[in-house]
Amino acid sequence: MLHVDLLLLDLVIVLAAARLAGAAAKRLGQPPVIGEIVAGILLGPTLLGPLIGERLFGAEMRPPLQALANVGLVLFMFVVGLELDQKLVRGKGRIAATMALGSTVVPFVLGCALALAISDDHTDGGRTLPFVLFLGAAMAATAFPVLARILTDRGMHRITLGGLSLAAAAVIDVLAWTVLAVVVGIAGAGEAEGQWKVLLTVPYALLMFLVVRPLLARLVPTYEKAGRLTPGLLSLVLIGLIGSAWATEWMNVHFIFGAFVFGAVMPREGAERLNHEVLSRLEQLAVLLLLPMFFVMAGLNVNLRALNLSSLGTLAAILAVAIGGKLLGSYAAARTRLPNRQAWAIATLLNTRGLTEIVILTVGLQKGVLDNELYSLMVVMALVTTAMTGPLLRRIYPERRVARDIAEAERAALGVIAAHQVLAVVPDSPAEQVPLVDLTATLARAKPSSEVVLAHLRPYPQGRLEVGTGLSSELAELAETLHDLETLAGTARAHGTEAKVVSRFSADVAAELPELVTGAQPDLVVLPAGVPGYAEIRAGAVCRVVTVSPPHSPDQAGPSESPAGPIAVRHGAGGDAAVHVALTLALLRDLPLIITGGSRASALAQRLAKLGVTASSGPIPAGALVVAPDTGTDTGTATDGAHLLVRAEQDADPVDWTAAVAALRAPALQA
C-alpha cells in the first residue's frame, strides 16, 4: 500500500537536497546537475545505507518517484529537441561534422573494445551485442545542454570557438540518440512479444516528419491570431508530446526518443515567439521540480558501497577510455582545421557528459543492458568528466583569451576591421629615435591593417615659473617635440603603415607610462631598455614585448640600424616568439636568418629552409643583429650580446611556421 505521507516527505527531501546541492555545485563553478546527482548518491545506500535509505526510499516509494522523474525526463527531452538549432551547423557543416565524427568514432570504438573485455562479468551471452553497442554509445556521448550552459556562463557562445563547439555537439547529439535508438531497438527485439514493434520505428519517423510536422506548423497562425499561448494550444502540444513518447515506449524503443523527435518537428519558421512561450511554461515545471527529481533518482540507484577492488580497476579503465578517447578523438579532428590551443579547448568541451550521459545510463539500466555495478561506475565517470571540464577549460583557454575573442567578435559584428596595433615607447630626444621607429614599423608590417602608435611622455619642467615668462619656453619645447614625433610618424608611414602620436607632459613618467601602455591594449610593444617604468610596462602588458638593448661596444651595430649582416636568433625554452620576430625581420629586410641553440634550432632551421627561407643553424657571426628570448630581467639589459629581447604574449600559441612564412610573404606585406 502506498503511503502518501511518506511520498510527500520523500518529495520534500529530494527537492530540498537537489536545490541545496545544485546551489553548492554552482558556487564551486560546476553545473548544478553535478550537485543534484551527488545529492541522490548521498540519499541512497552509499551514505544512508540500507537502514535509513530503505525506510525513506524503499521499494514501494521508488515507482511513484521514478514516474515523476520520467515525466520530467519527457519534458526535458522535448526541450532538447525543440532547442536543437539547425542554424548552429549552417556555414560550419564540414568542420562540425569532422569534429563530431572524430569525437564520436574514437570513443565509440574504444568503448566497444572495453565492453568486449568486461562483458563476461556484466552480461549474459545472449545480450552481448546490445551491451557492446550500448557501452560504445555511452562513451561517445556529449552533454549538449551542459556544454551550452558552460559556454554561456563564460560568454564563449559569442565567439567562433563556442559556435564550433555547439555545432559539433549538436551533430554528436543526433548521432548519439540515433545509435542509442538502434541499441535499445536491438535490446527490445530480444523480447518475444515486442520483436515486430521495433520495425515500426521507421514508419513512425516518417509520419512525424512528413505528416505531424506540417500539422504542427498550423499552430503558428493560430498563436499569432490569439496573441498569446492559450491553454488550448499548450494542451495540444502536451497531448502530442506525451502521445509521441508513448508510441516509442510501446515500440520497445524508449519514451525519450518520442519526446526528442516531437521537439525536433516543432515549427521553426516564424515560430520564435510560440516556441519561447512553450519553453518558458514547460521549463519552469521541468527545471524546478521534475528534472531535479530525475537526477536525484539517478543518484539513488548508485551504490558505491557494493564496489570492490576489481570494480576500481574497471572504473579506471572506463575513465581512461571515456576521457582519453573523447579528448584524443576530438583533438585530432579539430586540429585539422584549428590551432593547437583551440583544438584542445574544443576537445575539453566535447568531453562533457553530464545530463545526456545520465539519461543514456538510465535507459540502459531500465532496459536491463547495464547491471547496477556498471551503472554506478558509469555515473561516476559522467560526474568526473563533467566536473573536470570547467577547471581544465580555464587552464587551456583563460578568461583573457575569451575577452579578447569576444572583443574581436564584436568588432567583426559591427564591420570594424581591427588594426594590428604596435606601440613604441619613444624616450627623450625623439629626433634620435629614427632607428627605433624603423624597427617598429618593420615589425608592424608582419600583419595587414597595422598601426604604429608612438608614445612619449615629457616630465613637467622643474623649478618655479618666473613672472612674465609664463609657459612660452615649455610650449616651444613641446612644439619642437611634437614636430620631431610627427617626423618619426612619417618614417613609419613610409613603411606603409598608419601611424599616430600620443604625447603629453607628465608629473610622474615612471608611473603614468605603464598606465598609458596598458590602456592602449596594443598587440605588440617595442621599447628601449631602461625607460622610466620599464619593469611595470613589461609586467602589465599581456601582449608580446620587444626590448631594444643598446650596443655593448662602440663598434657594435645598434639593434635597429638595419645591418648588412644576417639576423641571428637564440632558440631555447620559450623561444618561439623570439624566432618569429627574427623571421619577420629577415624576410621583410631580405636578410639571411641564423638560428642557434642546439638540435632544436637545427631542426627548425631545416624546416624554414624547406619553406624557402634563407635559414641555417650555427654560431652567431660578427655584425649580426641578435634576437634572444627575454629572460625576465627588470631592466631589459641583455648580458649576452643580444640586441632585441622578446617576451612572448601571455597564453601564447605555438607558432605555425608554415602559416607564418606564408603570411610574411603576402603581396600586401612585401609591397
Image (spheres, grey):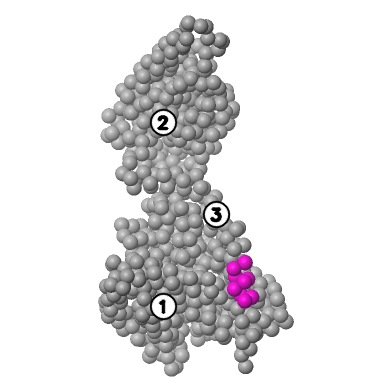
Considering the image in quadrants, where does the N terminus appear? bottom right
* Coordinates of residue 548 in the picture (x, y in percent): 49, 23
| Residue type at the position of mark 1 | Ala
* Label 3 to label 1: alpha-carbon separation: 33 Å
* Coordinates of residue 211 in the picture (x, y in percent): 27, 80
* Label 2 to label 1: alpha-carbon separation: 55 Å
Q: Secondary structure at mark 3?
A: helix
Q: Quick one: 601 or 471, which is closer to the camera? A: 471
Which-is-in-front pick, marks 2 and 3? 2
Quick check: 624 above or below 301?
Answer: above
| Residue 229 in view of the camera | yes
User: Would you name the residue on which mark 3 appears?
Assistant: 392
* Label 2 to label 3: alpha-carbon separation: 32 Å
| Contact between labelled residues 1 and 3, with CB atoms less than 8 Å apart | no
User: Would you name the residue on which mark 1 appears?
Assistant: 259
Q: Is residue 110 left or right of residue 451?
A: right
User: Would you name the residue on which mark 2 appears?
Assistant: 422
Label 3 packing within 10 angstroms: few (<14), some (14-19), many (20+)? some
Disc ID at residue 575: none
How many marks overall?
A: 3
* Coordinates of residue 49 in the picture (x, y in percent): 71, 78
* Coordinates of residue 577 in the picture (x, y in percent): 47, 35
Label 1 packing within 10 angstroms: few (<14), some (14-19), many (20+)? many
Residue drawn at the location 33% of the way across and 73% of the way down: 266
| Residue type at the position of mark 3 | Leu
Residue drawn at the location 51% of the way across and 47% of the way down: 399
In which quadrant of the rendered view does residue 540 lie? top right
